[in-house]
Image (tube, helix red, strand yellow):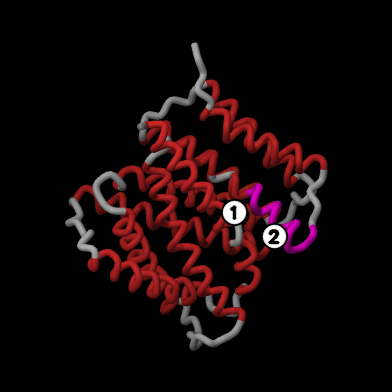
Amino acid sequence: MKFNEEMKGIISLIVATIIYSFFGVLTRIIGFEIPVFYGIATRGLVSLIILAILLFGKHLWKAIKRTDWLWFFLRSVGGFFGFMGSYFSFYYIPMGTAYFIFYGGSTISGYFFGRFLYAEKITRVKLLSLILALSGLLLIYAQSIGVGNALWMGAAFIGGIGTGTWNTFSKKISGHYSDIQLNFMDFSFSFIFTLILSLLFREQWVMPDLNNIWLANALFIVMFLSTGQLMVYGFKRLDAQIGSLIMLSEVLFGVILGYLFYREIPSYWATLGGILVITAIMLPEVRWKK
């Protein structure tokens, strides 16, 4: 039974990474044609309406315990910094550099929170997997990593930590509330944050239009709604450390998309790095016999 639940979690996270691998493409399409905080707020509002229909229509709402409000809030703050850090870094610095730093921060934070929040042991196999994963990332993006802009490289790392926080903190509350309620609360906080920031920065709000920019914004909504559900579902069934490793499969799907859309053929070193990442993901799932 436990193995079946783990497999469901693994499949859920892999599907989420396939969908999320389009993040960089959508970021480049939208850019700053839509004001950043206003764009997040519009996506948050539409997502809230959809989730509210599902949540209250199916009578899934549960009263939130006083002690759980903090975890809801901290998870949403992590998600906010995760998005902002990744959005700016993917736009301003080479995508390979952003991916490397972002997922380095995400994986390390996943291991950290798994150890100190959930008392997950860092076994020799997990440690080896971490080393292999980071080495694989380095090989995949070695040619595209440059000095770049320290500010946006720092943003990528903060984004990775924020995303790792958002992923792993869901385990603290996912056992008490439905996946839909977790994401409803997440979008609620996000909508409030970004609406206030948009007003403070006096962003110029624009009406939605039938063009590629707003189509990409709509696809962002679909992406966040689907991946939000899949990630909560997956991390609920896996160790935070294992889940963080599986999230690295997005890098591999990003390489595949690069070939399909832009005919970017991965180099020998990138291929070797991909093999290391795949090995790192699979290694902890091997049923080792003493």
Q: Which mark is residue 228?
A: none
Give the CA separation, mark 1 to mark 2: 9 Å
Mark 2: few/some/many CA within 10 Å (<14, 14-19, 20+): many
Q: Are marks 1 and 2 in contact (CB under 8 Å)?
A: yes
- Residue 258 belongs to the span the image colors magenta: yes
The image position of residue 52, as x and y in percent, is 29, 69
Position of the N terminus, as image quadrant, is top left
Along the viewing direction, whichever of 215 and 45 lies nearer the viewer: 215
The image position of residue 171, as x and y in percent, is 35, 43
In the picture shown, does residue 128 fall above or below 48?
A: above
Left or right, residue 133 beside residue 120: right
The residue at the point 55 percent across, 52 percent down is 17
Assign the magenta stretch its main secondary structure: helix
The residue at the point 70 percent across, 53 percent down is 256
* Secondary element at tag 2: loop
Left or right, residue 223 beside residue 31: left
Q: Which residue bears the numbered disc 1?
A: 156
The residue at the point 59 percent across, 54 percent down is 156
- Residue 72 belongs to the span the image colors magenta: no
Q: Which residue bears the numbered disc 2?
A: 93
The residue at the point 35 percent across, 59 percent down is 183
What range is drawn magenta here?
251-263
The image position of residue 49, as x and y in percent, is 33, 73
